[in-house]
Image (cartoon, rainbow, N blue to C red):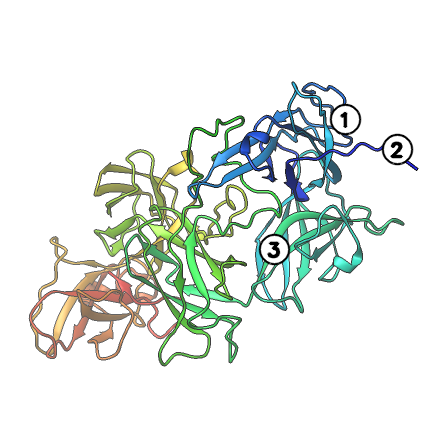
Amino acid sequence: RALGDAGVEVLVSPFECGAGSIVPAIGQSLDLACLAASPSACATATGYVGSTCGTAGASETASGAIPNRQTTTVPVSAALLATGKVDWRLIVDASNLQPGVSYKTCLDVDGPTGPAGFADAGCAVYVAGVASVEPTSAKKDRTTTLKVNCSPAGGCRVGAYVALCNKNVAGIVGEESLRSTISELRRNGDSWQVTVSTAGLTIGEYFQFCVDLDGRGSGMTWTATGIPFFVTGGVTASPAFAQRASGAVLKIRCGGGSSAGGCVGGRSKVFLASECKAQRFAASSTAGYVPSLSLSQPWSIAGSERTLTATLVEEPGAPVGSYLATIDLRPLRAGLPARLCIDYEGLGVNTGDSGVGIYMAGVTALNLAAVRRTSAQVLQLTCTEGCVTFVSTAYLAEDCPSVMPNVGAGAPPYTTGVSTKVGQMLGNTPTFLLTLDTRLLALGRNYRLCTDLDGSIGPLSVGDSGLSVHVSALEAQNASGQVYVKNTNGQEVKVLCAQGCGFATRIMVVASSAATCERAGGEPNAALQPDGVAATGGAVGGFGATKWKVELDLSTLSVGQYRLCADLDGVGNSFSFGDT
């Protein structure tokens, strides 16, 4: 018999796409690949995301958005990369789509003027009810409670099942794709939480979250969200703050005990970046893309703000799992809460967030090592870059906000313990003045200088500058504030202390060049004593109203300037030595 028409139409599309996940918001992006010999064959295409697609061969024009069913039709977007390769994406406004539902990718390859019409490109798109999680990584064999950010349009339910699953699945998936135990989504005030286990998962690998909204209901339908989650071997790094400079050395600890936590000296690699590129699978950022961009206009897509990669080297003489990384920090801006990104295998395939944040400090020096409790304590700050008068802010606190894992614009800053109110930096580079009310700070304690270089108007968060001051209970008895002694035995130093001092208070002399007042051993030190006959009148316990003295043996010191340090409770644990 002769061949006949089977009645089936076949669309030969110049595009290839992969399944993906988006959130119900504007600017959602799906990656495409143009398989045609010439980019011009793809340049006229339009598309949308919808529950159904038009029939191929129908002469269709651009369609509008239909709530819960489809997005507005838009042109396919193109960008010319720095490498000369053309990158294609469909960028849609998905704000009217229903969270927790899978849709189709509908493409009209020849645009509104051609005969082809819209057809299903074969790519399932999940509109996520779960928009993001914090943090985006966790240590292997740990149970971690995560903050879950849900779409404002819904998509999260109390009791919904959540589990980690394979990263390379999309749309509706079976239980065979699950890689962790199943947990239930729960409310925590105005937010959502879930507890996940990384037991048995591979260090240095990505997984994604899968959700079954029905939970304990009769129908168990798992949907891949595309939200990535990285498994680490446990990483710590010091210092937690750094200044922009070349050749900065980070001490990195992987694992714990006798374990190297997945790190391999000479192979594993790290870098610092504004984010560790933990993006949704099969979907990525729309930054740098312009719809209907002419391919005759070459341009480049700006990547994440990041340093070059550094290879871990074993730290000589240190325990197993101790490494050093030398990094040029100059590509990072001052004030950035940078993330430490790690690639355990060193192949550039799986690079994820180590869970460590390092703050790029802009303020490099303080004129005072100690402050008084007063309503207007003035500090002079040295800031060579990143600080702006009337914009940059700072305050003193027992602890500055930790550099939290970035999700979207980043986790909101928080502080623990006592702190001052925020003050504005006033001045011009490199000298700024900061006025703070320190009356609520505790005597005899050290406080960190926390800075936010773009203040309340910018995206940068608060971070630890690496600088601290001591709230001193002591003052020199003479008006100049200077104490003059000789390098011999029996030298008296007379001070004023209206509150906090006692017989347990210890006084120590350290070199002016010393970074801190922490005792290294061998420094002259002695106990504080009441000064004079009137010293026993008036103070609680009979130890003097304000005047105190200490007798020191300074015979071992060279002529020069030194720092007087005090520990209010001496051998006690409530206070430590600090600059007076």
Q: Residues within 10 Å of mark 1 (few under 14, many from 20)?
A: some
- The residue that mark 3 highlights is 229
Q: Is residue 426 above or below residue 349?
A: above
- In this view, the mark in front (2 or 1): 2
Q: Label 3, label 1: how many angstroms apart (C-alpha)?
A: 36 Å
Q: Are discs 3 and 2 less than 8 Å apart at CB?
A: no
How far across and how far down the image is residue 397, in percent?
39, 52
Q: Quadrant of the N terminus?
A: top right
Q: Nearer the viewer, residue 345 or 13?
A: 13
Q: Secondary structure at mark 2?
A: loop
Amino acid type of disc 1?
Gly
Q: Nearer the viewer, residue 244 or 285?
A: 285
Q: Is residue 213 left or right of residue 94?
A: right
Q: Quadrant of the C terminus?
A: bottom left
Please say whether residue 531 is visible from this viewpoint: yes
Amino acid type of disc 3?
Phe
Residue furthest to the front in view is 1
Q: Secondary structure at mark 3?
A: strand
Q: Residues within 10 Å of mark 2 (few under 14, many from 20)?
A: few
Residue furthest to the right in view is 1
Q: Is residue 436 left or right of residue 481?
A: right
Amino acid type of disc 2?
Gly
- The residue that mark 2 highlights is 4
- The residue that mark 1 highlights is 54
Q: Nearer the viewer, residue 144 or 51?
A: 51
Which mark is first along the chain, 2 or 3?
Answer: 2
How far across and how far down the image is residue 471, in percent?
31, 56
Residue at (77%, 26%) from the top-left corner? Answer: 54
How far across and how far down the image is residue 432, in percent?
24, 41
- In this view, the mark in front (3 or 2): 2
Please say whether residue 190 is visible from this viewpoint: no
Q: Is residue 296 left or right of residue 259?
A: left
